[in-house]
C-alpha cells in the first residue's frame, strides 16, 4: 500500500474511533467554558471555535460560556489601575465593572462572529438578557470584593429555546441582582451554574495549564483523574491556588449536581476538545464521583 493510501486509511480510522462518542453525545448538552490563553491567541481561538462548531454540526448541543479575565486585566492596567484578586475572584469596583462589561461584551460578539463565519447560527447573550443569570452579592471569605455576583438562579428556558431553534448560545458572565445592578461573575461559576441548570452531559473547562497538578512546578505531577474527596483534600492542604480554586470548586459542584462528565483541559493544545471527546486518549484532568470507577490505572 502506498503512503498516501495509508494516510487516508488512518484518517478513516480516526472517524470510526469517533463513532461511539458521536452516538453517546448525540443531542446531549455540552457546556464549554472557554478562557485562558486559548482566548488570547487568535489561531488557538479559531481552532477552539471550529471544534465547538464541529460538535454542533455532528449533533451535539454545545453552549459556550466565555471568560476574558486576561483581557480585562490588560484594560484595567491601561487605565492606570492595578488588577486585584481574592481567591481567584476579581475585586470589582464601579470603574472595573464598567471595563469588564465592555471587554466581555466585545469578546462575546467576536466569538459570535467567528461561529457565524463557520456557517453555524450563534446568539451571544449576557446573564442580563431575559434574566438568564440572577445574582446576589458574593463575598470572598467574608471580604467585600465589590460587584462580584453569586448566581442564585439560572433561567434555563431561554437556553432551551435557543437550542430548540438550533442556535449555538454564547454566554458572557455578567448578571443582575434583584435591584438590577450589574455584577461581574467568575466565568467558571457561570459555566457550572448553567451546566447544572441545563442538566448537561458534559462540562469542559478550557484553561491555560495541562490540568490539575499536585505540584504546579513538577510536570510529572499532573493528575489525570481526581475524585471529589481527593480534590477537596488537595484544596484543604493548600495544593490549589489562584484561578484553579474556583475552577475546582465548580467541578465538584457540577459533579455533585448531576453533570455526568467534568473535565479541565489545556486550551493551548490544538483541538483538545475533540481529542477529549472523540478518542480514548485521556487528556487534562477528569473529576470523578467518589463512587465512580477510574478509567486509567493509577501510576
Ligand atoms: N495545583 C494547581 N494545578 C494547576 N493549576 C494551578 C494549581 N494551583 C494554582 N494553579 C493556577 O491556576 C491557573 C488556572 O486558573 P486561571 O488562570 O484563572 O484560568 P482561566 O483563566 O482559564 O479561568 C493556572 O494557570 C495555575 O497558575
Ligand atoms: C468575578 C471575576 O473574577 N470575574 C472574572 C470574569 C472573567 C473570567 O472569569 O475570565 P477567565 O475565565 O478568562 O479567567 C474577571 O473579572 O476576570
Image: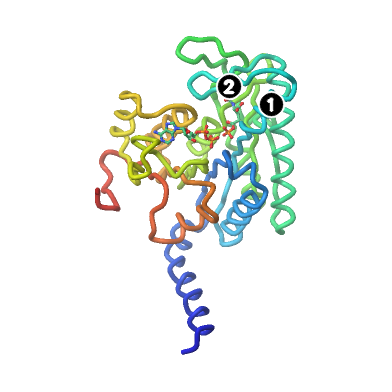
Ligand 2 under 8 Å from disc 1 Cβ: yes
The x and y percentages for residue 5 are 51, 85
The x and y percentages for residue 35 are 58, 39
First in sequence, mark 2 or 1: give its number: 2
Q: How many numbered discs?
A: 2
Where is 143 relative to 189, above or below?
A: above
> What element does badge 1 sit on?
helix
The x and y percentages for residue 186 are 56, 28
In the picture of the structure, the residue carrying the numbered disc 1 is 100
Q: Residue at x 59, y 45 (%)?
A: 38
The x and y percentages for residue 270 are 55, 55
**Position of 242 compared to 82: left or right?**
left
Q: Residue at x 32, y 29 (%)?
A: 232
Where is 44 relative to 221, above or below?
A: below
**Badge 1: how crowded within 10 Å, few (<14), some, or many (20+)?**
many
**Position of 41 compared to 17: left or right?**
right
Q: Which quadrant would residue 135 be assigned to in this image?
A: top right
Residue found at the far bottom of this picture: 1
Dot 2 and dot 1 residues touching (CB under 8 Å)? yes
Q: Residue at x 61, y 55 (%)?
A: 47
The CA distance from mark 2 to mark 1 is 10 Å
Q: Residue 233 versus residue 228: which sits nearer the camera? A: 233
Residue 90, numbered label: 2
Residue found at the far front of this picture: 217
> What element does badge 2 sit on?
strand
Q: Residue at x 39, y 39 (%)?
A: 212
Ligand 2 under 8 Å from disc 2 Cβ: yes
**Badge 2: how crowded within 10 Å, few (<14), some, or many (20+)?**
many
**Position of 212 compared to 187: left or right?**
left
Amino acid at each position: 500500500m502506498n503512503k498516501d493510501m495509508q494516510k487516508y486509511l488512518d484518517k478513516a480510522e480516526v472517524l470510526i474511533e469517533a463513532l461511539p462518542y458521536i452516538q453517546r453525545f448525540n443531542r446531549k448538552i455540552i457546556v464549554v467554558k472557554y478562557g485562558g490563553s486559548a482566548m488570547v491567541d487568535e489561531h488557538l481561538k479559531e481552532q477552539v471555535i471550529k471544534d465547538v462548531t464541529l460538535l454542533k454540526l455532528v449533533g451535539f448541543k454545545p453552549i459556550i460560556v466565555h471568560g476574558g479575565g486576561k483581557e480585562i486585566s490588560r484594560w484595567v492596567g491601561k487605565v492606570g489601575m492595578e488588577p486585584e484578586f481574592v481567591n481567584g475572584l476579581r475585586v470589582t469596583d464601579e470603574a472595573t465593572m464598567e471595563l469588564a462589561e465592555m471587554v466581555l461584551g466585545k469578546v462575546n460578539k467576536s466569538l459570535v462572529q467567528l461561529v457565524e463565519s463557520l456557517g453555524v447560527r450563534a446568539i451571544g447573550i449576557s446573564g442580563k438578557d431575559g434574566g438568564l443569570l440572577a445574582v446576589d452579592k458574593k463575598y470572598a471569605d467574608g471580604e467585600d470584593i465589590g460587584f462580584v455576583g453569586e448566581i442564585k438562579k439560572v433561567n434555563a428556558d431561554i437556553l432551551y429555546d435557543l437550542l430548540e431553534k438550533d442556535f449555538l448560545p454564547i454566554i458572557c458572565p455578567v448578571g443582575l441582582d434583584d435591584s438590577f445592578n450589574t455584577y461581574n461573575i467568575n466565568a467558571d461559576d457561570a459555566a457550572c451554574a448553567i451546566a447544572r441548570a441545563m442538566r448537561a452531559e458534559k462540562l469542559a473547562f478550557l484553561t491555560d495549564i495541562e490540568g490539575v497538578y499536585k505540584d504546579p512546578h513538577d510536570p510529572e505531577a499532573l493528575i489525570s483523574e481526581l475524585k471529589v474527596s481527593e480534590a477537596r483534600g488537595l484544596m484543604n492542604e493548600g495544593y490549589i491556588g489562584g484561578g484553579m480554586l474556583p475552577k475546582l470548586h465548580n467541578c465538584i459542584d457540577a459533579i455533585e449536581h448531576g453533570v455526568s462528565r467534568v473535565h479541565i483541559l489545556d486550551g493551548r493544545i490544538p483541538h483538545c476538545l475533540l481529542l477529549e471527546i472523540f478518542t480514548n486518549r485521556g487528556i487534562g484532568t477528569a473529576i470523578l464521583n467518589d463512587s465512580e470507577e477510574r478509567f486509567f490505572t493509577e501510576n
